[in-house]
């Protein structure tokens, strides 16, 4: 169910975006996303400027407004609308209650691809879990899901936590999914480890060494990307696999 403010925001978004559509850009943008979604052809810088114009002079949306706007944006076919919803949620994540995680879950599993899953995971889910620690149990559930995008979101939600990272949980998720066959899960494992290596490179090296018989080559390559000596030694061991 929509709200009056959500309806106004959505109407302004649709009007502004469709007026700015550029078919000459839309084709290459769609091709870059492997033809999974149609595009209007609006570059991100221009899109964000339009978003600021749309919101100018309006009251700040509350969580119910944001839910309604996100659902409306997810209903339109063109991908820029979903990007807009992600931006709005990221901007207001500190206002979102724990139960909003259910809304984000639905967005993650609908029209799923890395371009919306990653910002939702790293900025929205990550922000929700940081503010509402009870959601850690939800992350534990997602980390074991049959849906690869929920697994990816669980792996990536701590990406920007730095010193606040729950290291045991990060490593546990990575170990549990080390043999996962999906590219996006393997990539997420490597990305999450590489990011944490900026905080504790030795811990990541130990983890990779301890799980070298199960981690994919992709995960290892990503995890050790900024540790060339460790990556070279691992490659020489001949024990990695894809």
Image (cartoon, rainbow, N blue to C red):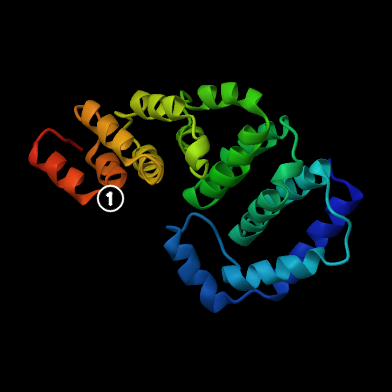
Residue at the outermost right position = 4
Relative depth, front residue between 49 and 105: 49
Query: Which image quarter: residue 133?
Result: top right
Res. 75 in view: no
Q: Residue at x 29, y 40 (%)?
A: 219
For residue 38, above or below residue 126: below
> Which quarter of the figure is the N terminus placed in?
top right
Tag 1, which secondary structure?
loop
Relative image position of residue 62 (x, y in whole percent):
83, 45
Q: Residue at x 47, y 27 (%)?
A: 143
For residue 33, above or below residue 216: below
Query: Which image quarter: residue 189?
Result: top left
Relative image position of residue 63 (x, y in whole percent):
80, 42
Q: In this rendering, would 33 be left or right of 11? A: left
Relative image position of residue 186 (x, y in whole percent):
34, 38
Relative depth, front residue between 180 and 28: 180
Q: In this rendering, would 24 be left or right of 200? A: right
Label 1 Cα neighbours within 10 Å, binned few <14 / some 14-19 / many ≥20: some
Relative depth, front residue between 51 and 233: 233
For residue 227, above or below residue 96: below
Identify residue for label 1.
225
Q: In this rendering, would 173 be left or right of 142? A: left
- Total tally of numbered discs in the picture: 1
Relative image position of residue 238 (x, y in whole percent):
8, 36
> Which quarter of the figure is the C terminus placed in?
top left
Q: Residue at x 67, y 30 (%)?
A: 132
Q: Residue at x 27, y 43 (%)?
A: 218
């Amino acid at each position: 169910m929509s709200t009056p403010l959500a309806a106004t925001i959505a109407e302004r978004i649709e009007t502004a975006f469709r007026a700015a559509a550029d078919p000459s850009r839309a084709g290459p943008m769609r091709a870059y996303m492997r033809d999974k979604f149609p595009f209007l052809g609006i570059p991100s810088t221009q899109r964000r400027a339009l978003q600021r114009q749309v919101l100018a002079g309006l009251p700040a949306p509350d969580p119910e407004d944001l839910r309604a706007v996100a659902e409306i944006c997810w209903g339109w076919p063109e991908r820029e609308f979903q990007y807009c919803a992600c931006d709005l949620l990221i901007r207001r994540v500190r206002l979102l209650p724990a139960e909003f995680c259910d809304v984000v879950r639905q967005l993650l599993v609908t029209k799923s691809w890395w371009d919306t899953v990653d910002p939702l995971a790293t900025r929205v889910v990550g922000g929700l879990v940081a503010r509402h620690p009870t959601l850690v149990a939800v992350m534990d559930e997602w980390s074991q899901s049959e849906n690869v995008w929920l697994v990816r979101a669980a792996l990536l939600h701590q990406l920007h936590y730095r010193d606040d990272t729950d290291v045991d949980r990060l490593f546990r998720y990575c170990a549990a999914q080390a043999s996962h066959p999906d590219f996006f899960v393997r990539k997420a494992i490597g990305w999450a480890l590489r990011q944490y290596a900026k905080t504790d490179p030795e811990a990541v090296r130990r983890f990779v060494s301890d799980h070298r018989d199960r981690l994919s080559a992709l995960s290892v390559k990503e995890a050790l990307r900024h540790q060339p000596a460790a990556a070279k030694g691992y490659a020489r061991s001949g024990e990695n696999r894809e």
